[in-house]
């Protein structure tokens, strides 16, 4: 009986690489699944401007990976501005590209200042942080920034 128990123990040790050898198996640190894989979160931003006649809505899908923005996509259902605003039309892709690679901390620290007087045509709001608004399309820039911040807030609350 003792021989069969010893044989069984030896057989088990043969299956385990570090059993009795004094060697330890090296392992790679694991990365939590929620931070390693890309996650897409939808955010929205709203802004009223120009005597209340201009209502902006931005709906963005923000892809987040490794604590930074991988990309953002402005949904077609957004009512950001019309292409009549040449600042927006000519610089839309450049503006959106600013978010790629931006850390989530930078998005959290971004200050979105809405217009304080919607009856003042020149009071379109502003941004403070690592994102630059498009000159001539500041209201559009502000509402998109608000939507990106909303997406990051939703991501943080998961």
Image: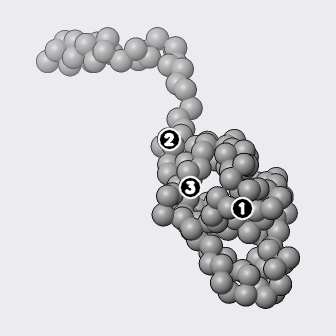
Residue lying at the far left in this picture: please name it.
1
Q: Looking at the image, which residue is at 73% across and 87% down?
A: 51
Secondary structure beneath label 3? strand
Q: Looking at the image, which residue is at 62% across and 78% down?
A: 55
Q: Which residue is mark 3?
A: 74
Which residue is more in the foreground, 39 or 59? 59
Q: Which residue is mark 1?
A: 85
Secondary structure beneath label 1? loop
Q: Looking at the image, which residue is at 32% across and 11% down?
A: 14
Q: Is residue 3 visible?
A: yes
Q: Which residue is mark 2?
A: 37
Q: Is residue 2 visible?
A: no
Spatial CA span between label 3 and label 1: 17 Å
Q: Quadrant of residue 82?
A: bottom right
Q: Few, some or many C-alpha atoms within 10 Å of disc 1 (few <14, some 14-19, many ≥20)?
A: few
- Position of 39 compared to 149: left or right? left
């Amino acid at each position: 009986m003792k021989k069969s128990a010893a044989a069984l123990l030896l057989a088990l040790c043969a299956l385990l690489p570090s059993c009795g050898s004094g060697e330890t198996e090296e392992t790679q640190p694991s990365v939590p699944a929620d931070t390693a894989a890309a996650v897409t979160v939808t955010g929205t931003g709203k802004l009223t401007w120009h005597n209340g006649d201009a209502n902006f809505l931005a709906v963005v899908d923000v892809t987040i990976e490794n604590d930074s923005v991988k990309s953002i996509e402005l949904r077609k259902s957004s009512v950001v501005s019309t292409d009549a605003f040449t600042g927006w039309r000519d610089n839309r892709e450049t503006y959106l590209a600013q978010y790629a690679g931006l850390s989530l901390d930078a998005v959290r620290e971004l200050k979105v200042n809405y217009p304080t007087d919607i009856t003042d045509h020149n009071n379109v709001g502003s941004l403070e942080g690592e994102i630059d608004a498009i000159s001539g399309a500041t209201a559009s820039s502000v509402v998109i920034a608000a939507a990106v911040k909303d997406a990051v807030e939703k991501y943080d609350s998961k």
